[in-house]
Amino acid sequence: MDMGHTHLVAAYAVTIGIHVVYFAYVAVKYRAAKKQLR
Amino acid sequence: MKALRAVWLLATLAVLAEGFRVALFVVPPDSQQGDVQRIFYYHIPSWAGMGLFFAINLACSLIYLAVRNKNQVLALKADALAVTSAEVGVVFCLIGLVTGSLWGRAVWGIWWTWDARLTSTLVLWLIYVAYLLLRRFAAGPQMRTLAAVMAIFGYLDVPLVYMSTRWWRTQHPAPVFGGSTGSGIDPSMMPAVWWNLAGWLMWGIFVASLRYVSEYRAQKAEQDEALRMLDMQQHELSGARG
């Protein structure tokens, strides 16, 4: 795997990774809000 | 609402999967950069997402300032959406910066340079991070108004970022879309742009819709608590007088 491919894979992994981490944060907040409402 | 959100999520994941497939396995590689140019298909949607959500933040901040003394319910909704959109915009902006840095390292041989486009974008990200920190740590009745004013001033950097590659000669390439004559990419590459643009914007809307619910409920609970305390104080005062 040359340098270009490493950077390509890293860019896609970082994009998906950051979105997944943020989604986890949002999901935790959402569940907490739902629980509070009950 | 729950069913609509589930359908939206399924559609989003399907579009994202197709975008991933088209970007990596269908469209041809760039004639000069080779496969590393495929970063573009994740880089561009990040900027589009940032532009969309910072624009929503601006609109909501303006609405909040306009109605905060006339319509409390609308003001609260606008404020909650302003926070939500700033947060999602910051996430997209961060991804744009990181993917750009990775692409820069592969093509230019450097992770970062202080040129007009990169610097103005970093400043933009820092402005909105500061906005979120203000929202998180400041207290008091003026905080929302201050944050809305800050959001309006912060947004002034967005056109600067957009125009930076047109106004100044930068390390960053000239604009691909909406640039001078001859700009753009080969039409055979466009499907990857459209699929990923649609997919990531749909994802942003989905996440923002979830985040909005918790933010609005938190703010509503905070407001209700403040009103309850005010009511109790008034009762105590009237009791002491009586």
Image (spheres, coloured by chain):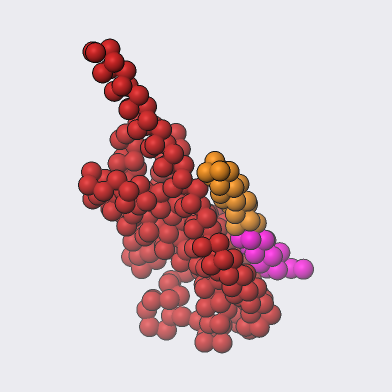
Residue B151 shows up from this direction: no
Image x and y of residue B70, in percent: 22, 47
Q: Is residue B36 above or below residue B146?
A: below
Q: Is residue B146 magenta?
A: no
Image x and y of residue B122, in percent: 46, 51
Determine the image quadrant of residue A38.
top right
Q: Quadrant of the C terminus of chain B?
A: top left
Determine the image quadrant of residue B227.
top left
Q: Is residue B178 above or below residue A25?
A: below
Is residue B17 found left or right of B206 in the rendered image?
Answer: right
Image x and y of residue B215, in percent: 47, 47
Tell me the red chain.
Answer: B
Q: Residue at x 64, y 61 (%)?
A: A16
| Magenta region, main secondary structure | helix
Q: Spot the residue most to the right.
A: A1
Image x and y of residue A13, in percent: 67, 61
The magenta segment:
A1-16
